[in-house]
Amino acid sequence: MCGIIGYVGDRKAKPILINGLLRLEYRGYDSAGIATMENSGIKCVKNKGRVAELENCEEINILEGTIGIGHTRWATHGKPSIENSHPHLDNKRTTAVVHNGIIENYVELRNFLTNNGYEFFSQTDTEVIPNLINYFYNKNEGKSKIDFLRAIKSTVEKLKGSFAIEILNNDFKDEMFVVRKDSPMVIGKGVNENYISSDIPAILSFTKDFYFLNDLEFAVLSKDNVEFYDINLERFDKQVKNIDWDMSSSEKGDYDDFMLKEIFEQPKSIRETIGARVSKNNMIQIDELEITKEYLQSVDRIYIVACGTAMNAGMTAKKILEHFCKIQTEIDIASEFRYRDPLITEKTLCIYISQSGETADTIAALKLAKEKGAKTIAISNVIGSSLVREADFALYTHAGPEIAVASTKAYTSQIVLLAILALYFAEILGCESEEIEKLKEEILSLPSKIEEIFDNTEQIRKFAKIISNEKDVFFIGRGIDYTVALEGSLKLKEISYIHSEAYSAGELKHGPIALIENGITIVGIMTDSNLVQKTISNLQEVVTRGAKTFIVTNQNLGNFNFDEVVKIPEISSYISPILSVVPLQLLAYYISKEKGLDVDKPRNLAKSVTVE
């Protein structure tokens, strides 16, 4: 959702803050602002719209301070406007705050502050934070740093919800204060300078050394030091972690858009995800897990819990886990998981998937499982993220930074890792080895087979041009192909704004076929030889009603009158979604480009959904 950035050092803060905000644009936002500590006190500049519009504000040119905070806002409370943009200041204009998250009890706190003489100038939940800090700070007799920390502590103890907060105060002109709970925040360690961000790529060009704050931990940053405090305001030390991401992954290079670059990076991201985990004629190695045969034999149910694209990735793993491991596997939407009283015991294994590792619903679902005694595994792309720190075990996809809002390489890397995990469990359980060895070989062949699909790019682009003005598109598939239909439909919705639906192909005649009329487009996926004839029959039902058809398949279909057939390499149906989704990613991309839309930053969407 919102993006936050902070800097303290010897250099001017403004260009560093602007650079960081530009790198956070992919998260989705509607306004932006920065505040710096000047000789005369805090100065704040903000504007509705893009970061470029903030840069064009005349008053931004007077900012000379070497300590500052910045923010890109994704509107929750209050419409996009200058007044609702961050940073927000208290009534005395002595404290400035930027905030990522949501304050659920802000109305109650706003009423409390109003009754104590405070005025409000925005519709946001965030504006209560600097005023509460001011209220508690003024109640203290002292004005030392620890007194100000006490005021921050008293404030966060009143807040219900999630937050990552950066704070400046006129009494502490060389320091910045931060605290977090359930919202992402990293601290970048430099030489005579330090950084804050909601996401690693925003400051990756400045440092690769990071501190990760846990919930309700405080930090005070100066140019040459970072002090950490627990909830009791006791000092403690924290270990720095090196993040060895290639900075080029955060740059577009010769590509027009990050999404296209990330589609073409999938062979590399899959190779990195496979890494040393899989090799021919050897047992799968997943050193991060401590799972025994006795434990797996005791597991009576696996839950895979995620949101959006990550959930679609999880759906593909069900077939592999149940076939090879013979363990009942359920897929759950994270936002619904906690509210349906799921049957979780010590015999339950829960797998949580999140590209960013900061998805609020998924983190909340993981905490519930831990409370009920289940063992938890987190799958993420971000080292040190909140989800992986909460889980019993963490597995990383190693896909590198994914900047485009619509996920591509993270999705395919997640499926690869889930397949490897399922085979790892199967080997521990002593399941049939010949079939496992064959699937391992096919996993190793995935990168080169995806590269073959890129030869069909022009064919896909031409069909995208034909259907770019469609109002409705339908995706169908059977079995594991249905999970790909869901992901293809989601990609089209996300970046082209075309209404699309995904159906299990056999369900068409149970209602949805009423929507099929002359000229409408149907996208069909067929990769399972056991189901291909059934799917062809379903497709003939729409062809006879005048539908245009775009088919992705690795099967020999014969002489059927489909409008466009994209052939992909043959592969086991268990991992076929990793290949069959690629033409659908490209189809959505080229339709969006044909419509002249912003592919990387689609409207209303955010890369990391950090509020429930």
Image (cartoon, rainbow, N blue to C red):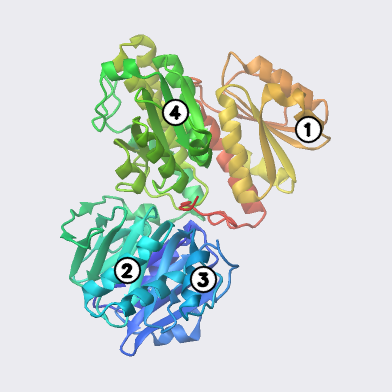
Label 4 environment density (alpha carbons within 10 Å; few <14, some 14–19, many ≥20): many
Task: Identify residue for label 4.
Answer: 303
Amino acid beneath label 3: Asn
What kind of element bears circle 2? Answer: helix
Amino acid beneath label 2: Ile
Amino acid beneath label 1: Ala
Label 3 environment density (alpha carbons within 10 Å; few <14, some 14–19, many ≥20): few
What kind of element bears circle 1? Answer: loop
Residue at image x 47%, y 31%? Answer: 314
Task: Identify residue for label 1.
Answer: 547
Label 1 environment density (alpha carbons within 10 Å; few <14, some 14–19, many ≥20): many
Task: Identify residue for label 2.
Answer: 152
Q: Is residue 330 visible?
A: yes
Task: Identify residue for label 3.
Answer: 111
Residue at image x 33%, y 80%? Answer: 138
Q: Is residue 416 left or right of residue 600?
A: left
